[in-house]
Image (tube, rainbow, N blue to C red):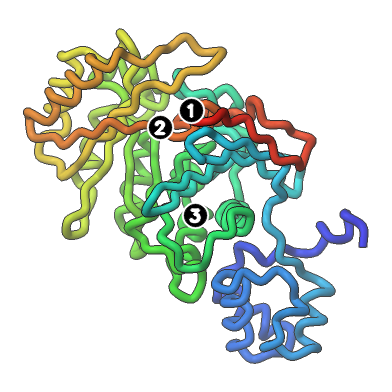
Amino acid sequence: MGIDQAEAKLNLIGFSRAELEQLALELGQATYRGRQLYRAIYARRQRNFALLTDLGRPFRDRLAAAYRIDYPAIQGKIQSRDGSVRYLLALDDGQTIEAVYMPEADRITLCLSSQAGCAVDCRFCFTAMLGLRRNLSTGEILGQVMAMMADQQIAPRSRLNVVFMGQGEPLLNFRPVMQAIGIMADPEALGLTLRRITVSTSGIVPRIYDLARELLRPRLAVSLNASTEEQRTALMPINRKYSLRQLIEACRAYPLRPRERLTFEYVLLDGLNDSDADALRVAGLLNGIACRVNLIPYNPGDGLPYRPPPLARVLAFQRLLSERGVPAFIRVSRGRDIMAACGQLSLAGVPANTAENLHVASPVA
């Protein structure tokens, strides 16, 4: 079968349980057959209809004739010296996105994209240089998880964290992101724990209020990155539409579960937002909010003029927050050597026309 014929078939990755039950009915089957198909696709991660032997042969044949179960194709990958892997994934329409696999001793973290490119235009972010090409579908979001799990041979029910910190602003693609999270967190599907799923936002205030009303709610991380309105507008133009004041109000109103905290991410830029005065203003902004602050020394690269502060400045910033009752942690970004760290995903350095595995990691000294 040619590629065009295969792509003409509808991909079932991204279908919810209710949608697959309806599909079963439309194909003359009982609804429980749709639930079986749902578990086969997500929990058992089957991609070949012929292997779904709990379904009758006629049903399997009709599915195979009109549908497919495909993950985004891995066009390239680069491995970091710290074990992280940066993936270039191809979508059906020729667009490409990036996702990152980050292994640690006691867990695995998958960093996902929610859009191809990004429209938010944070001045220090390499992804912003791509501009926005389009939103991703529910299936394209889930497909990133499943493609990396298959490639890395991650066993079902592994201790897995998922963070929406790749390309794009998740809250500007709200419904597909939430639908994907619903399938990730369903015990009959991928079975991930909601507290291990984090959505990171640049501060789309109306969608933060929408997220607060969701029954299945992941953790929320907010990119703060500034201590004044003027400073934040210069670094994050989205602040013109949703001001720092409005953002903090939304965060104060955000309902937290027992022992849950909001996460604020603060990218430290040498000489711009890293002074003692900045730290004191941040402590004041966050006073009374159950939160933690991740301090991220800037991850540099070619094309942008910013630099990370000296370690002494980072430690001083952390100390001032901690002394004022704001828990602050220095986040060591993974995959910096392969442009896979926070804010670095921009398709740079990943081959667009190869399926070869590229390993640029040097031995650890």
On the image, numbered disc 3 is attached to which residue? 175
- Evaluate if marks 3 and 2 touch, with contact meaning CB atoms under 8 Å apart: no
Q: Which mark is residue 347?
A: none
Residue neighbourhood size for the residue with mark 2, other residues' Cα within 10 Å, grouped as few (<14), some (14–19), many (≥20): few
- Evaluate if marks 3 and 1 touch, with contact meaning CB atoms under 8 Å apart: no
Distance, label 3 to label 1, CA atoms, is 31 Å
Amino acid carrying mark 1 in the image: Arg
Tag 2 secondary structure: loop
Q: Residue at x 21, y 39 (%)?
A: 292
Distance, label 1 to label 2, CA atoms, is 7 Å
Q: Which mark is residue 333?
A: 2
Q: Position of residue 211 (x, y in %)?
A: 35, 52
On the image, numbered disc 1 is attached to which residue? 336
- Evaluate if marks 1 and 2 touch, with contact meaning CB atoms under 8 Å apart: yes
Residue 160 sits in quarter = bottom left
Distance, label 3 to label 2, CA atoms, is 29 Å
Amino acid carrying mark 2 in the image: Ser
Closest to the observer, 64 or 310:
310
Q: Give the side of residue 288 with respect to residue 8, left or right.
A: left
Tag 3 secondary structure: helix
Which image quadrant: the N terminus?
bottom right
Q: Residue at x 20, y 46 (%)?
A: 253
Check the image and report above or below for 148 versus 270: below
**As drawn, which residue projects farthest toward the right?**
1
Closest to the observer, 78 or 133:
78
Mark with earlier residue (3, 2):
3
Q: Position of residue 289 (x, y in %)?
A: 15, 41
Amino acid carrying mark 3 in the image: Arg
Tag 1 secondary structure: helix
Residue neighbourhood size for the residue with mark 3, other residues' Cα within 10 Å, grouped as few (<14), some (14–19), many (≥20): few
